[in-house]
Every structure is written in C-alpha cells, then in structure tokens.
Image (cartoon, grey):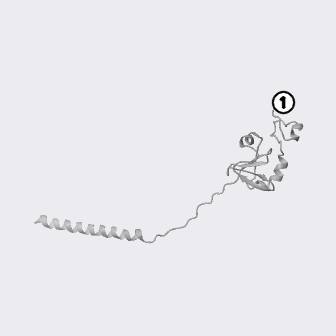
Amino acid sequence: MINKKYFLKTNQIGLALGAALLTTLTGCVGYVDGPRAEVYSPSPVVVVQDDYVYYPDYEVYYSSSRHEYAYRDGDNWVSRPAPRGVTVDVLMRSPSVRMNFHDSPANHHAEIAKQYPKNWKPSGQKQAPKENQKDGQRDDRDGNNGR
C-alpha cells in the first residue's frame, strides 16, 4: 500500500511538471510569430581621403584609394581606371611626387603644375639637355645624346 500512495504522488508531480512545460513551450510560439521590435542604427560612414601621386611629365594624378587616374581631357577633368596617351608602365617609371591635398586635383592643378613643371626631376637626378626638352623627349643616357 505504501507504494501506491508514493506512485500517485510521483504521477501528480510528473503531470504538473509536464503541464507547466507544455504551457511554457506553447507560450513561446506566440512570441516568435508576433511583431518584432527593431532598432534602426545607421551603418557607420567611412570616409576615405584621397591620396594622390602626381606625374609631372604627363600631368596625371593617381589616387591609390580610388585606383583611378585623374587628368584633363580638353577643358574637363576626368577620372578613369587607366591614363590616356601613356601606358601605366611608362607612367610608373617617370618621376612622381606625393601630394598633400585630399580633394580634387582640379582644385590644385594650377599651383602644382607651376611647382612641378614637365621634365621636373627629384633633386639628385639630372635634367634632360635643353635641346631634348624642346620637343618633349628625354635622353636617359646621362647627356650623351645617343653617343
């Protein structure tokens, strides 16, 4: 007889726990399908400043952040993935200057072109002979003029 009373108590506790568990799980379903509260947070704005390298011989600027070349095309400034009229290899072998401005080259070109004219060389490099500068050609053989 003792076992029967104990067995009934265990069944009642199990029944009560099962009912509580079922109620809990059933209540969760309503919340999953219900309306959701969302908080809008705008994506952080990342500002990348342009950094230009200027190639005086060709009056071309390169932006490493944009991977584009900027130059004048007639009276307009253009930005393109490759410069017009010169290969990237030739451009990379020509003298260059890192610029300190971070906006459009058009805003600074008049000043930059005066400071770094065509045929400009960094200090320590020889200038091309004047006779070769007139026609826009350079002689890279230490002034021997091909001799």
Instruction: Identify residue for label 1.
Output: 146
Q: Nearer the viewer, residue 147 or 55?
A: 147
What residue is rendered at 73% in x and 41% in y?
92
Measured along the vertical axis of the image, is residue 31 above or below residue 55? below
Which residue in the rendered view is the most extreme toward the top?
Answer: 147
How far from the left and from the top, in percent, is residue 34?
A: 42, 71
Give the amino acid at mark 1.
Gly
What residue is rendered at 13% in x and 64% in y?
3
Q: Quadrant of the C terminus?
A: top right
What residue is rendered at 25% in x and 69% in y?
16
What is the quadrant of residue 134 in the picture? Answer: top right
Q: Nearer the viewer, residue 122 or 62?
A: 62
Horizontal side, residue 137 vs residue 1: left or right: right
What residue is rendered at 81% in x and 39% in y?
123
Measured along the vertical axis of the image, is residue 48 above or below residue 58? below
How far from the left and from the top, in percent, is residue 33?
A: 41, 70
Q: Nearer the viewer, residue 11 or 38?
A: 38
How far from the left and from the top, in percent, is residue 1?
A: 10, 66
How far from the left and from the top, in percent, is residue 45?
A: 62, 60
